[in-house]
């Protein structure tokens, strides 16, 4: 594994991120819309009993954090397709650096970008009334945030290895991300959903990631599920390991990996 290659690819992604202010604004529009429109608007109509006595805004913010992580992480595949079209990806693939190092470098840059977007969402949510229970245990939320980011960056890399058209990539990613968002506990507790939807949600990695963030930020009883936070963590670790393996394999077998 070439750590210098990993660092260079990470640094390149950070420079692209900091220089594209429109990208930063664009990735925050949807989370802010959900926070204000749902958290402050719809929140007054939600029965707090179903939320364990907490306000809907308290319940919603961890879900929006997960949504932001997912959307930003998956969109990292756009840069792969862009580099593929302009030949940069082919150039780095023919270097002596291992393909695993290239994949990890991509994932490191995408994870950092996704984490930064999530932290900005947390700061905005604090300004509109979110009140997390900050303790040393709250740091576990960062672990879940990183695991969500790595899961969906892997998905973005898998899709980018198959798709070569930017417009097609956008349509396909929406096909994956929108169902995953609504078939999770991001916007509503699983107990309030139809039984079949609730059952399907337990096969959704976003459900476990958001449940872990919610319990870490609000307390162990705030996840509104019967799953322990350690089970959330175990499931996410298994999913991340499987997704990274699948991403590395897909990347090595793609046309740029030959």
Image (cartoon, helix red, strand yellow):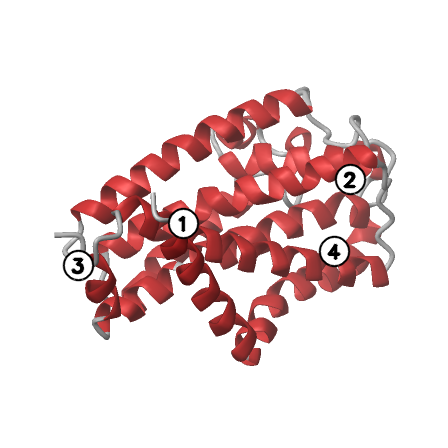
Q: Where is 13 relative to 207, above or below?
A: below
> In which quadrant will I find the N terminus?
top left
Q: Earlier in the sequence, mark 4 or mark 1?
A: 1
Marked residue nearer the N-terminal end (2 or 1): 1
Residue under numbered circle 2: 217
Q: Give percent across and percent down for residue 212.
A: 66, 33
In the rendered image, residue 177, in percent from the top left (x then y), is placed at: 45, 50
The residue under label 3 is 94
Badge nearest the viewer, 3 or 2:
3
Q: Which residue is mark 4?
A: 122
Decide which of tag 3 and tag 1 comes sooner along the chain: 1
Can you see residue 251? yes
Number of other residues with Cα within 10 Å of mark 1, as a class: few under 14, some 14 to 19, many 20 or more? few
Q: Which residue corresponds to the image point at 39% horizontal and 48% vertical from the top-left?
A: 104
Quickly name the residue at label 1: 3
Residue displayed at 33% across by 35% down: 245
Q: CA distance from mark 2 to mark 1?
A: 33 Å
Secondary element under disc 4, as helix, strand or loop, is helix
Instruction: State how far apart marks 3 and 2 are (Cα).
Output: 44 Å
């Amino acid at each position: 594994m070439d750590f210098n290659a990993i660092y260079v690819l990470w640094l390149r992604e950070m420079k692209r991120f900091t220089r594209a202010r429109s990208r930063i604004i664009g990735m925050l529009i949807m989370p802010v819309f959900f926070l204000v429109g749902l958290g402050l608007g719809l929140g007054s109509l939600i029965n707090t009993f179903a939320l364990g006595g907490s306000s809907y805004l308290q319940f919603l913010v961890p879900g929006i954090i997960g949504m932001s992580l997912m959307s930003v992480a998956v969109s990292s595949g756009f840069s792969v397709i862009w580099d593929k079209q302009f030949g940069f990806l082919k150039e780095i693939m023919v270097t002596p650096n291992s393909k695993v190092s290239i994949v990890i470098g991509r994932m490191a840059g995408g994870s950092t970008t996704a984490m930064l977007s999530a932290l900005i969402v947390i700061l905005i949510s604090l300004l509109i009334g979110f009140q997390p229970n900050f303790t040393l245990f709250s740091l576990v939320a960062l672990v879940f945030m990183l695991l969500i980011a790595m899961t969906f960056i892997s998905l973005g890399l898998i899709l980018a290895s198959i798709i070569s058209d930017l417009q097609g990539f956008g349509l396909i990613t929406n096909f994956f991300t929108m169902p995953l968002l609504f078939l999770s506990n991001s916007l509503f507790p699983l107990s309030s959903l139809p039984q079949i939807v609730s059952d399907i949600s337990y096969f959704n990695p976003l459900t476990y990631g958001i449940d872990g963030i919610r319990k870490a930020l609000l307390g162990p009883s705030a996840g509104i599920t019967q799953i322990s936070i350690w089970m959330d963590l175990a499931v996410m670790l298994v999913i991340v390991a499987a997704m990274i393996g699948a991403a590395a394999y897909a990347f090595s077998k793609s046309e740029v990996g030959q």
